[in-house]
Amino acid sequence: MSTYLYGIVRAPRTKKPSELPNEGVGNPPSPVRLLKHRELAALVSDVSDDYHAESEGLRGMRRDMRVHAAVLNHVIESTTVLPFRFGVVLPDDETVVHDVLHARRAPLADYLDALDGAVEVTLRAAYVEQRVLEEVVAENPQLVPRGSGRRAQSYNAKLETGRRIAAALQAKQRHDANWLLDVLRPHVRDVRVGEPSSDLMVLSASLLVDRKRLPKFDETLAKLNTHESGRMQFDCLGPLPPYSFVELKL
Amino acid sequence: MVAESGHSVADEVGTDPIIRREPLVRRDPVAFGTGPIARRDSHVRRPPSSSGLYDVLDLILDKGIVVDAFVRVSLVGIELVTIDLRVVIASVDTYLRYAEGAERLELYKPRGGEDQLPDMMGMDEGGTLKKGSKKLKKAVSGDDDDESGGEADEGAVGKLAGGVRHVLKHGVGRIMERLSGEEHDEGDRSDEKRHARSGNGKHKSKREKVRGR
């Protein structure tokens, strides 16, 4: 049997750690357990030696990905945890202790300190197309030729208009993304901004928030949501283990 | 309903018969909490348990601690995810949609006397058309790349129908959908519409290109 890795926590001082899920990844799944070494502990479970994420096909892979995320989501509710990427399998417990918990004690302990009491929150904001188009046209009246509504523009004129609108949208997006971050920054410890994946996406970011400051963060986000009602829509998910803030390659 | 139970209810409850005849209290939803809108807004953030696999796919496949030598996920899967998450350039169809949307806005804009004059003279439109044709060659040659990537891009700039997740899913493409197993019916339908429109547009621009030469 090989050892599948979910995450790293501080070794619990109590004899009986808080309940861990009974079913880990793989088919059949084994219980998730704590593998301790001095002040650190790894969340692991047994998997077959030939375990591979895709060995059970797409459905199996999806199931295992959900389990991986769920195990970590469960732990982050009460404890700081450094999450592993999906699919890390070491030959046995001894290798985990030797190569991870012992060999990399220092950076792991440092990260546990740095991320202590913090959770990740993902935030995506997108424009409501109709509304933002109205804005762009109102702010840039030269974009759309007067009376164009009465007589349809030629195909190429439309293309040019569309290009200019897209450019204006991009500028607006950059401005609004910065503004959103300015509003939220006082309530977060750190930010990782991703590339927006479409014209209408204003912001796609991962935020590191102190667990204790979540209520204030939520309040601020709610105000933003109200303020931008009809113009922007927000999608916020959390608390999550800090995947985006543990940049460690072992 | 209350009346049907007859006097036995009154006997049990021991209340005045008049009370039995009172209608049930209507529950006003607004009376609960601070009002429906306020309650919705205070919960913008949703817990991970409410999310599907799609929302965390990027995190668990691309972030977190990695032990290179021991990853048991095939490279192909990971590569697909990172490719999907690049910035998507707006396609020709997006430009058309924006222009048409803006045109519609102009159409419904209330017109004053000042607005009438240039329109009647036709000057502005002529000027714009000239500019349009100058930039035509540039636009067409520049768009050659966009057209080939059109299929992928179309999803990326889909209409924001059901919220941010809808937009993100289009932006990230079909492969992410397959991986997470979550369906996007709306997106498929609107993609078909755009395909139908783009058929005409692409054909036109090819003709223009030949003429421009």
Image: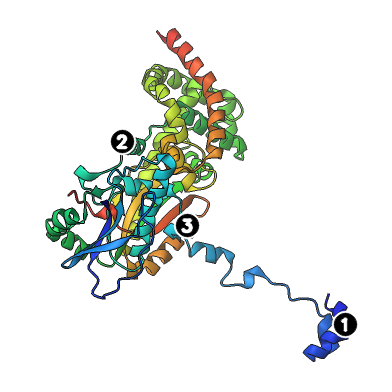
Precedes in sequence: disc 3 or disc 1: 1
For the residue pair B198 and B96, the one nearer the viewer reads as B198
Precedes in sequence: disc 3 or disc 2: 3
Where is residue A2 drawn, in percent x and y? Answer: 26, 50
Q: Which residue type carries mark 3?
A: Ser
For the residue pair A126 and A21, the one nearer the viewer reads as A21
Precedes in sequence: disc 1 or disc 2: 1
Say above or below: B71 vs A3: above
Secondary structure beneath label 1 = loop
Say above or below: A79 vs A66: below
For the residue pair B52 and B38, the one nearer the viewer reads as B52
Choose top left, top right, bottom left or bottom right for residue B47: bottom left
Where is residue A73 drawn, in percent x and y? Answer: 37, 60
Q: Which residue type carries mark 2?
A: Glu
Where is residue B174 drawn, in percent x and y? Answer: 44, 35
Q: CA distance from mark 1 to mark 2?
A: 74 Å
In the picture of the structure, the residue carrying the numbered disc 2 is B79
Q: CA distance from mark 3 to mark 2?
A: 27 Å
Secondary structure beneath label 3 = helix
Q: Which residue type carries mark 1?
A: Gly
Say above or below: A144 vs A113: above
Chain for numbered disc 2: B
Residue A117's label in the rendered image is none
Tags 1 and 2 on a common chain: yes
Chain for numbered disc 3: B
Residue B50's label in the rendered image is 3
In the picture of the structure, the residue carrying the numbered disc 1 is B6
